[in-house]
Image (tube, rainbow, N blue to C red):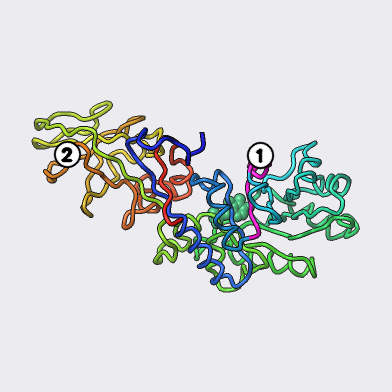
Amino acid sequence: MSALTAPIGQSPAYLEIDVAAIVANWRILSARHGAPVAGVVKADGYGLGAQLVAEHLFAEGCRHFFVAHLSEALSLRAALPGAMLAVFNGMLAGQEGVFVQHGITPVLNSLADLDAWRVHGAGHEAILHIDTGMSRLGLDQDEWAALQGDPARRAGINLAYVMTHLVSAEQHDAPVNADQAARCAQIRAAFPGIKTSFANSSGIFWDDIFRSDLARPGAALYGVNPTPGRPNPMRDVVRLVAPVLQVRAIAAETPVGYNGVWIASRPSKIATVAVGYADGYLRSLSGRATARFDGHPIPLVGRVSMDLATFDVTDFPAIRPGTALELIGPGHGVDALAAEADTNGYEILTALGARYERRVRGL
Ligand SMILES: *Cc1c(COP(=O)(O)O)cnc(C)c1O
């Protein structure tokens, strides 16, 4: 079932996705980068809907898209006519023909991939990935040296871009950034006339050193701050709102939730909402997160359950069954919730569940 076709009214909580803000964020990133900017829509568009995001970025003029898996590319191909649609994780053995047939661009992550594409993908565009510090995917130091020593190895390969991926671009004081900037300069020099692709979201906010012919932001499109510690240049994209199911009065010393880890220190009122860790409201938020009511922070108390969470609303008599609490929203966005869960905004977004009603704004 696609998120957009979920029957209205079936779910008591809703996730609001501001697609106009996603498009505005792409424009902000494009202006900042001063060169083409792709849309990274892997993991179902960071949990917000790859089809929805890709279609709107395409309508805005975005012509380069990245996903992680071939299956993700196949499901988007028809919606993005003529656009580059590339697969970070590259080809598994035997998939070459599917890439060719559907006009999907593989990221070649090894010399073996390069050789396979020469045989099966002749003439079709590919992206070559050089590892400059992630130790994850891409040509390692030895393969990169071998390729430099034998330029004929890439004869017959139609290289659209040479790319690398940044390790700590969101941490301005990380020494690895200078190392990677030097490696980026080496890549530019080694592939004259071939376009480069270096920056993720945070890389766009460095002055020049990671500028390339195609930036690849994901998180910043969806409102995650690409410059942690500094004001967020991006617009908020998501709001998560859940109505209160019940409000109960409890006596002082009454425990709340699994294992009774929170015990009321005074006569209290507890509001229960139908959002739990199965909806991406992570269990690690227990005792740490706050929701908002009328702009006021409302503390989450007790353990987050699979389908429910409980809030201390003692000081807010206006909160009743049916009152909407905002679990994510302006002023306490994805990054703030991530800090409370001891994770990052990426994990908050990609964990957002499939049970909410999804309301798309800004169409
Ligand atoms: C996910 C990913 C991106 C996007 O990174 P953000 O930090 O979300 O902007 C870019 N390049 C590669 C290789 C990725 O895996």
Disc tally is 2
Quadrant of res 314: top left
**Residue type of the residue flagged with mark 1:** Ser
- Horizontal side of 335 relative to 219 (left or right) equals left
Q: Is residue 141 magenta?
A: no
Who comes first in sequence, dot 1 or dot 2?
A: 1
Q: Which residue is mark 1?
A: 71
- SS at circle 2: loop
Residue 311, image x, y percentages: 22, 39
Residue 280, image x, y percentages: 41, 39
Q: Which residue is mark 2?
A: 320
Between residue 311 and residue 236, name the one nearer to us.
236
Residue at 50% x, 65% y: name it: 172
Residue at 22% x, 38% y: name it: 322
Residue at 60% x, 73% y: name it: 34
- The label shown at residue 249 is none
- Horizontal side of 336 relative to 139 (left or right) equals left
Mark 1 near ligand 1 (CB under 8 Å)? no
Mark 2 near ligand 1 (CB under 8 Å)? no
**Residue bounds of the magenta highlight:** 63-75
Q: Residues within 10 Å of mark 2 (few under 14, many from 20)?
A: some
**Residue type of the residue flagged with mark 2:** Arg
C-alpha span from label 1 to label 2 = 45 Å
In the displayed structure, 229 sits above or below 251; it is below
Quadrant of res 271: top left
Between residue 55 and residue 180, name the one nearer to us.
55
Q: Residues within 10 Å of mark 1 (few under 14, many from 20)?
A: few
Residue at 63% x, 56% y: name it: 165
